[in-house]
Amino acid sequence: MSAPNKTELTAAAPLETLTGRRLALVVTGGVAAYKAADLSRLWIKAGAQVRVVLTENAARFITPLTFESLTGQPVALDMWSRPQYDIEHISLADWAEAVVVAPATANFLAKMAHGLADDFASTFMLAFDGPKLVAPAMNSRMLAAAATQDNMSALMERGVMVAPSEGGLLACGAVGDGRLADLNTIALMAARALGPNDFAGRAVAVTAGSTRESWDDIRFMANRSTGKMGLSLALAAWLRGAEVTLVAGPSLTQMPPKLPDFSIKPVESTRDMLAALEETKFQTLIMAAAPADFRPAERVSGKIKKSGGPPTLPLTSNPDILKSLPRDGRVFVGFAAEDQELVERAKGKLRDKNLDLIAANQAGGDGNAFAADDNHLWLADKNGEVTEITPRPKFAAAWSILDAVLKLRK
Ligand code: CTP
C-alpha cells in the first residue's frame, strides 16, 4: 500500500489550482471593462497573483485605483509616465505566466493580430510569449465584420485562446452576439491554460449524480447522490486538458459554466445514461454516478390516486452500465459505494466489472460520501495496487483519481 503523496493538490475548488500563479489581466476600452474588476477578484480569491494593465480608453471606463485596491498591485497604464513602481512591459512579460485580455475590443484584437505596439498594453502583448487568452466584447456588427473575424482566426492559428462572446442585450441597445463571456468561464479557462495539460488529446466521459426511475408521471425513485464527485472529476479532467463529456443525472445541484471542450448531456434514468454513453466518443470513462439498480416494472401514465390505497410496485433490474458498454480498449474507472469491507468489496467489483481502476468510498454511516463535500477513498487498480486517498475536498480527491488513471498507462 503506498503512502499518500505529500505534494498532492489540496485545492478545494477548480479555481484554486491557480493559487500562487501569476496572471496579467489586460483591460481594453469597452463598456464591459467594469466586469474585469470582478474577474480579477475571482482569481485573487482563489489565491492567484494578478497584475492589471489598462489601455488609455479602458481607464475612461474604470479607474486604475479600482484594480490597485483589488489586487494590491500597481496598475500599468502608459509607457511614458515616470515609473513609480517596478512595472514596465518587459519585466511584466517575464513575470506573468499567462495573460488574459478581457474585455478585448475589436481594435485591440486587430493590434494583436498585426503586431502593432503603440502603447503599454499592445507592447506588452507583443513581448509576452506564454499562453494568451482573449475575451472579445463589442457590438455584434463589429464582431461579425470580416476584418474582426480574420483577426480572430489569425490569433487562434497562433495558439491564442478565445473565450467566445455570448448573445444577449448589448450596451448599445442592440440584441446580438458580442457580450463578454461569463466571468467564471474566463476565469476557469485561465486556470486550464496554466494546468498540467497531462490529459490533452484524451476524450473523457464522466457520469455524475443519481438517476431517476419514474413510477407515474409525478413520482420517482432515486438515491442520495448529488453528483459533486462526478462534477469535480469532470472539471479536474478538463483543467488538465481533456475533452470532457459530463453525463449528468437530474440530482446535480451545481452546473459548470459554458466551457469549450466540455459538453453536458443531461439524462434521467439509468437506461438514458447508458444510451447517452453509447453515443459518446471517449477513451476514458469514469462512472462516478450512482445509477439506480432497479426501476418500477411498469410506469403508470398520469398520477396514481391515493384513493386506491398504497400501490404495490413490482421492480425490475436496470442494466449494469459498466458491464453493458463494449470495452474497445478503453479505460474504465468505477466507484464502489460500500457500507463495510470497502477495499475487499471494491476489489470484487473491479474483477466482476473488468475495470482498470476502482475508487471505494463509504455509503452511509460514519464518513458517508453521499452529498458530502469531502471524500475518503481507497483506490484499487487492475495491477493489484491499493492506495489510500486521505479525507480531502472532493475536487482534490478527483485530482488524485486522475493521477492514478495516468499511472495506469505507465
Ligand atoms: N454502476 C453501473 N450501472 C449500474 C449501477 C452501478 O455502471 N446500474 C456503476 C457505478 O457507477 C459504479 C459501479 O458500477 O461505478 C459500482 O456501483 P455500486 O453502486 O457500488 O455497485 P453495484 O454494482 O450497483 O452493486 P451493489 O449495489 O450491489 O453494491
Image (cartoon, helix red, strand yellow):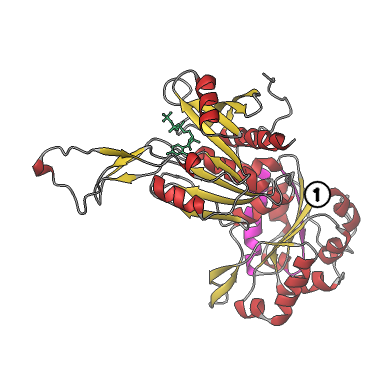
Check if residue 44 falls in the magenta segment. Answer: yes
123 and 351: which one is in front? 351
Kindly indicate the quadrant of the structure image that contains residue 366: top left
Residue at 11% over, 39% down: 309
Question: In the image, is 359 to the left or to the right of 123?
Answer: left
Q: Would the CB of label 1 be found within 8 Å of ligand 1?
A: no
Check if residue 378 falls in the magenta segment. Answer: no
156 and 271: which one is in front? 271
327 and 238: which one is in front? 327
41 and 136: which one is in front? 136
- Residue 102: x %, y % from top left: 69, 61
Question: In the image, is 46 to the left or to the right of 53?
Answer: left
- Residue 408: x %, y % from top left: 69, 35
* Image region (quadrant) for ligand 1: top left
Q: Quadrant of the N terminus?
A: top right
Q: Quadrant of the C terminus?
A: top right
Residue denoted by label 1: 97
- Classify 64 as above or below 109: above
In the rendered structure, which amino acid carries the disc numbered 1?
Glu
* SS for callout 1: loop
Question: In the image, is 204 to the left or to the right of 118?
Answer: left
